[in-house]
Amino acid sequence: KIGDQKMLSVSESMDETGSDRGPVNALSKALAKDLGPYQSYIDTIRLVDFKVRITQGGTEAVTRVIIDSEDDTGRRW
């Protein structure tokens, strides 16, 4: 927990792909595809909103994507 935000860190590496009309929804679908033992927690989560930030410019730009998700009970992450 950082401040009032809860953070989840998983040390296991997994490779998944997703496709959709936009890159953020494709990322959301890839994340929801198969998270092994965590899958049951995210089955009802859907993408609600996102923000894209470019933290450094130029050819080696660093991009940060903040994704807001919501489950079927209305809880948001």
Image (cartoon, helix red, strand yellow):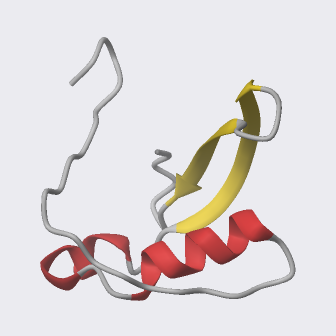
Residue at 86 percent across and 81 percent down: it is 21
- 13 vs 25, left or right, is left
Residue at the image point whose x is 72% and y is 47% from the top: 50
- Position of the N terminus by quadrant: top left
The residue under the point 45% across, 60% down is 73
| Image: 53 above or below 38 | above
Q: Looking at the picture, how far across and down is residue 66, in whole percent?
A: 61, 41
Residue lying farthest top? 3
Would you say 21 lies left or right of 33 here?
A: right
- Residue 28, relative to residue 63: is it above or below? below
**Residue 58 percent coordinates (x, y):** 83, 32
Residue 34 location, quadrant:
bottom left
Of residues 52 and 75, the one nearer the viewer is 52
Judging depth in this view, the residue of 19 and 44 nearest the camera is 19
Does 25 sit above or below residue 1?
below
> 43 and 56: which one is in front?
56
Seen in the image, is 40 located left or right of residue 29?
left
Quarter of the rendering containing residue 8: top left
Measured as percent of width and height from the top left, residue 33 is found at 43, 87
In the depicted view, which residue is nearer to us: 38 or 23? 23
